[in-house]
Amino acid sequence: MAGTEVANAEVVVVGGGLEGLSIAWALTRAGVTDVLVCERGGLAGGETGKSSGVVRCHYGVPSLAWMAWKGVQVFEGAADLLGGDVGFVPSGYVVGVGPVNADALAANVADHRALGIDVALVDPDTVAGLWPQLELADFAAFAYEPRGGYGDAYRTALAYGATARRGGAAIHPYTPVAALTAAGDRITGVELVGGQRISAPTVVVAAGWFSAGLVAPLGLELPVRAQREPILLVDPGTPVHGAPVLSDLVSLQYLRPEPSGQLLVGNSDHRRPDFVARPEGYLNRATESETERLGDKLAARLPGFPNLALATSYAGCYDVTPDYNPVIDRVGPTGLLLAAGFSGHGFKISAAVGELVADLVVAGDSRDPRVPAADFRLARFTEGRPLAGAHSYVGAGEMR
Ligand SMILES: Cc1cc2nc3c(=O)[nH]c(=O)nc-3n(C[C@H](O)[C@H](O)[C@H](O)COP(=O)(O)OP(=O)(O)OC[C@H]3O[C@@H](n4cnc5c(N)ncnc54)[C@H](O)[C@@H]3O)c2cc1C
């Protein structure tokens, strides 16, 4: 029944990952209950399903630091806010830098403390107490966020969705959107792959990397690329429990324990990104050379674990923008919003993303002065005004 209107809604959200489902939840909280989410596959089956789930507020961009801090509070309050445990493990978060970045670390921590974030500079003895097996000699400075840690992005996304449903939202998996529809300078809804139309005066595109292709026919260019990243799951020999997440900005890696006691290890070296043409059909495991590179760095950082062994590996794709920061903006025809390009930050800030988008829909602007909507405008790229932190790290500037 091509072209037939099968439904209408006040807001259609395209994409049922962390961001789309958080947006649906936030809209229902803001009183917009006639929300319909269209997800082409299973819920949270995209980038969200690959997320390492690290929760830290350590960002040079104050709005991102604050959005992550709001996220911490939502994860901590999940039992009340989201109806149950979503897998957040408040293991703490440590970031360590070399001499060249020690001043920037101190400046970032001072900014975070001024925002009210629970973080402190700590000495090597404190870090050794938290992670006795770590080699610390090449670090010059550390910061510790006791309320950071890691979560389960899949469970969190499903909990956002379930809470949104309880608030009135309709969430439709296996409902692929073929195109956005517009009349003149107004968005009018979406057309599904089967040809059916869903009418809506407001459409939010939160489809990760695929957002670019959805908005392109409307003359909008979203500069986003798919950056493949391998992840290793490592058997440390002796299970690790209770250690904090470590951002190692000397070796450019991050590691955290899994609830099983294995270690999850990821890459933080973005100097030679592995951009793939499409985030589908890419190699879903670490290559031998990636395993060797990540494994060597891990072994050098963990001399206290002489029997590290690869358990398994997989790979995900970040949807990265040129400044490694998201676009959350009203764009193109009236009624169209974009929330994409989360570039590796999208789990920890997801609750705040939903709130910002709901504010843009309901009030036309952010209602949180610490989250200026202007930070996330699409036009910053064409204007040559990328979003960047005040104290960025030499060799590790991306994703901070
Ligand atoms: C390997 C990896 C590790 C990460 N680690 C962390 C971390 O430690 N901490 C952190 O904060 N963040 C992390 N992230 C980032 C975070 O996971 C993402 O930013 C977040 O999941 C993005 O959510 P999303 O909803 O924008 O995208 P997605 O989860 O990809 O959701 C978009 C959805 O849109 C759907 N879609 C696409 N096209 C259509 C269409 N035409 N019609 C309908 N639906 C459509 C897709 O099927 C998909 O489900 C990581 C990401 C990766 C890949």
Image (spheres, grey):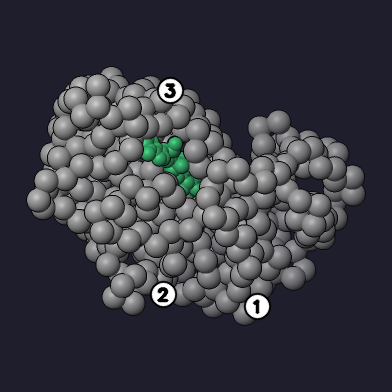
Q: Residues within 10 Å of mark 3 (few under 14, many from 20)?
A: few
Type of amino acid under label 3: Gly
Camera-side residue of 4 and 263: 4
Q: Is residue 144 visible?
A: no
Check disc 1 and report the residue beneath it: 99
Q: In the structure shown, which secondary structural element does the residue marked by tag 1 occupy?
A: helix
Residue type beneath disc 1? Pro
Q: Are marks 2 and 1 in contact (CB under 8 Å)?
A: no
Q: Residue at x 31, y 72 (%)?
A: 382
Which is nearer the N-term, disc 2 or disc 3? 3
Seen from this angle, which residue lies furthest front? Answer: 2
CB at mark 1 closer than 8 A to ligand 1?
A: no
Q: Position of residue 5 (x, y in %)?
A: 17, 25
Q: Earlier in the sequence, mark 2 or mark 1?
A: 1
Q: Is residue 268 above or below residue 353?
A: below
Residue 275, position as x, y percentages in the image:
57, 59
Q: Residues within 10 Å of mark 1 (few under 14, many from 20)?
A: few
Q: Secondary structure at mark 3?
A: loop
- Label 2 vs label 3: CA separation? 37 Å
- Measured from the top left, where is residue 344 in percent x and y? 50, 53
Q: Which residue is mark 3?
A: 84
| Disc 2 to disc 3: CB gap under 8 Å | no
The CB of the residue at mark 2 lies under 8 Å from ligand 1: no
User: Given the image, on which type of amino acid does mark 2 rest?
Assistant: Ala
Q: Earlier in the sequence, mark 3 or mark 1?
A: 3
Q: Is residue 68 above or below residue 153?
A: below
Question: Rounded to the nearest whole Å, what is the CA distance between mark 3 and mark 1?
Answer: 43 Å
User: What x and y, as percent, mark residue 203?
Assistant: 22, 41
- Give the numbered dot on residue 390: 2
Tell me what residue is drawn at x 63 percent, y 68 percent. 272
